Image (tube, rainbow, N blue to C red):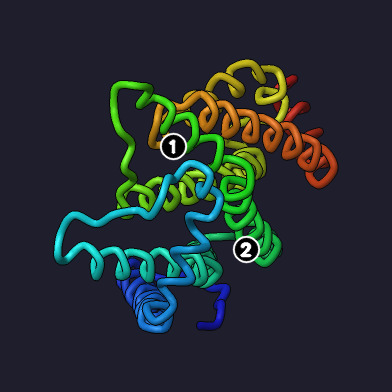
Amino acid sequence: MPIEAKRMPFLAHLNELRKRLTIVGAVIVTLILATYAFTDQIYAFLIKPMESVISGQAVTLDVLEGMTNRFRLSVWSAFVIGSPVVIYHTLAFFLPALKPKERRWFMLTFAVAVVLFLGGAAFCYLLILEPGAAWLAGQNGEIFSFMPRASSLMSFAMWFMLGFGIAFEIPIVIFYLVYFNVVPYAKLRKNWRFVWVASSIIAAMVTPDWSPVSMGALAGAMIVLFEITMLVLRILLSKKIREQKLAEAA
């Protein structure tokens, strides 16, 4: 759907939302149908980082579970593959509310948002899934016999990758908080300790386990992303930052 830089009444916004939801829904449904035939390969890819933790083959405990697992895999794959479409139409829906000068950031924001989401998912897949699963499996100790369930392994990997992907979007939020003068740059820079603590809290909320491996890695990644974002803000919005300082001084 083309991007139209114009103001719209409330009912027009609802109509625009319906159109964009229809496009996103059609893309996701098409991808679900297309990926269902490749669920064996998707499952093998998804659990590959955790192969060292799994002893033998994962099990299913219900007659419908095999089909349900395949459907969940195809839905997850559809959202990951279709994430650029979802992100694009989510951002484009808010575009008419922006001023012409603000709209110039749209395509850059879209590209960065896609890269950050996929980068967060890849970061989790390559560096977090194996040690995170190993730590959690180790909690069985000598008391319990570990027999991995396929649906549990899938949920672990899916939710972790989704959580990391969403958490990596924080730089976009920070950028626009400063750009729209919601939170001045100097205030964020001065209160960096609070931001670091908030990052740790968000990491604990996003990760679906209590593993210090996953929470620590996500918190560390978010802190690094925050510092990089502050550096980028200093370069891209130098004029606005100076204006904010003058306004605070006045």
Q: Is residue 123 left or right of residue 245?
A: left
For image coordinates 36% across by 68% down, the residue present is 75
The quarter of the rendered structure image containing the C terminus is top right
Q: Could you tell me which residue is drawn at 34 percent across and 45 percent down?
A: 148
What residue appears at the point 40 percent right and 72 percent down from the top-left corner? 39
Left/right of residue 105 with respect to residue 47 in the rendered view: right
User: Circle 2 is placed at which residue position?
Assistant: 110
In the image, 201 versus 11, the foreground residue is 201
User: What's the CA distance linking mark 1 and mark 2?
Assistant: 23 Å
Q: Which amino acid, mark 2?
A: Phe
In this rendered view, identify the residue nearer to me: 28 or 177. Answer: 28
User: Badge 1 is on which residue?
Assistant: 206
Query: Which of the two residues, 159 or 117, is positioned nearer the viewer here?
Result: 159
Most extreme residue toward the left is 63
Amino acid type at circle 1 is: Val
Looking at the image, residue 227 lies above or below residue 105: above
- Label 2, residues with CA under 10 Å away: few <14, some 14-19, many ≥20: many
